[in-house]
Image (spheres, helix red, strand yellow):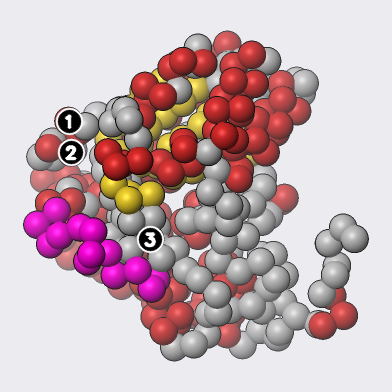
């Protein structure tokens, strides 16, 4: 996993200043959203569980910005808040879902792991490890029958590769030429188990190659690298109508979930190393070095984003609770 030791962004001039500023705002929005979410969990406004996306922002930003959400779809895993923001769902509706409010994106009945918006082609988070893989293969099969060259993008963690669903889905996607992009977000830990303790192959891309699928590994801390890979991969998939597997190397800053302190399975030195390659830090350093934005402008942007999100928290908290009569609405009995 050599990308872990790269000291800085690879830097690709094909991304305009406007695009880079957009990426920065998106990453700051995700980071601040997650921090506010954790705060409100501790304040008792969020029930159930909470999985933070902090540290992994460049993966979602690079891939989702390359999508065409008029024809492409997302099938997600349980670390889904950031992806909901990126497809354009109002933050107040995401907070409302976390708070169990009727205005939530899933009517306040899904919570953190079960966001859903057909309008935004976001076909749901999934609380089951690997649970979205077969769904994504099915969505890809449906898209293959459409004239628009749509692609299904499926996000999942490294632990999902240990499920039978992964192997079944990869096999059928390859056999039937399904246009599904399988993105393994490898943050090095399946809950608290390090990759080399649950996978006989440390390079997870090797585990997908047996199905005749094109694969590659990308530095998930480097938004330039992710964006470049995404653009190229989507072009290939639209032309060839074939599945693709990506291993995005990244790192989650929090434990597996909000109650996991992670201190019993990883150390301060490791965490400091990854914080040194924080995707937001790398992008801001690049923007300042290239004189695209000043440090003062970046801090002003951060404050602006936080102010906007605080207003969304207040809006969501004031929303009504779901009507008990709607408990079985949208449920097949």
Residue 219 included in the magenta stretch of the image: no
Residue reaching furthest to the right: 333
Residue 319: x %, y % from top left: 66, 84
Query: Residue at left 41%, top 65%?
Result: 257
Residue 8: image quadrant is top left
**The C terminus, quarter of image:** bottom right
Q: Is residue 225 left or right of residue 37?
A: left
Query: Residue at left 48%, top 41%?
Result: 160
Classify mark 2: helix, strand or loop: helix
| Mark 1 or 3: the one toward you | 3
- Residue at numbered disc 1: 2
Region of the chain picked out in magenta, as a range: 258-270
On residue 256, the disc is 3
Circle 3 Cα neighbour tier, 10 Å, few/some/many (<14 / 14–19 / ≥20): many
Classify mark 3: helix, strand or loop: loop
Residue 301: x %, y % from top left: 30, 65
| First in residue order: circle 2 vs circle 3 | 2
Main SS class of the magenta portion in the image: loop
Classify mark 1: helix, strand or loop: helix
Give whichever of 117, 287 is nearer the camera: 117
The answer to whether the residues at label 1 and label 2 have Cβ atoms under 8 Å apart is yes
On residue 4, the disc is 2
Give above or below for 168 relative to 159: above
Q: How many marks?
A: 3
Calculate the distance from the C-alpha at mark 1 to the C-alpha at mark 3: 24 Å
> Can residue 326 be seen by looking at this rendering?
yes
> Can residue 84 be seen by looking at this rendering?
no
Residue 34: x %, y % from top left: 40, 67
Q: Is residue 4 left or right of residue 30?
A: left
Calculate the distance from the C-alpha at mark 2 to the C-alpha at mark 3: 20 Å
The answer to whether the residues at label 1 and label 3 have Cβ atoms under 8 Å apart is no
| First in residue order: circle 1 vs circle 3 | 1
């Amino acid at each position: 996993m050599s990308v872990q030791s790269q000291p800085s962004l690879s830097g690709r001039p094909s991304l305009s200043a406007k695009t880079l500023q957009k990426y920065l705002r998106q990453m700051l929005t995700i980071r601040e959203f997650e921090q506010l979410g954790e705060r409100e969990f501790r304040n008792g406004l969020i029930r159930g569980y909470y999985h933070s996306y902090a540290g992994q922002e460049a993966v979602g930003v690079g891939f989702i910005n390359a999508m065409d959400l008029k024809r492409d779809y997302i099938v997600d895993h349980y670390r889904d808040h950031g992806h909901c923001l990126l497809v354009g769902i109002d933050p107040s509706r995401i907070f409302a879902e976390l708070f169990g409010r009727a205005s939530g994106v899933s009517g306040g009945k899904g919570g953190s792991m079960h966001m859903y918006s057909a309008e935004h082609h976001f076909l749901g988070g999934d609380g089951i490890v690997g649970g979205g893989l077969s769904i994504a293969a099915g969505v890809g099969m449906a898209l293959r029958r459409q004239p628009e060259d749509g692609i299904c993008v499926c996000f999942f963690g490294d632990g999902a590769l240990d499920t039978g669903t992964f192997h079944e889905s990869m096999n059928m996607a390859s056999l039937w030429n399904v246009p599904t992009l399988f993105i393994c977000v490898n943050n090095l830990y399946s809950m608290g188990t390090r990759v080399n303790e649950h996978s006989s192959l440390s390079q997870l891309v090797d585990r997908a190659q047996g199905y005749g699928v094109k694969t590659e590994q990308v530095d998930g801390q480097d938004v330039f690298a992710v964006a470049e890979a995404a653009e190229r991969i989507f072009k290939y998939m639209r032309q060839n109508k074939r599945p693709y597997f990506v291993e995005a190397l990244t790192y989650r800053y929090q434990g597996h979930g909000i109650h996991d302190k992670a201190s019993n399975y990883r150390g301060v030195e490791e965490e400091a190393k990854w914080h040194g390659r924080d995707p937001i830090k790398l992008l801001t350093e690049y923007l300042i070095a290239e004189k695209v934005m000043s440090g003062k402008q970046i801090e002003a942007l951060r404050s602006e984003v936080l102010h906007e999100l605080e207003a969304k928290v207040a809006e969501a908290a004031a929303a009504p609770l779901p009507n008990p009569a709607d408990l079985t609405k949208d449920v097949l009995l």
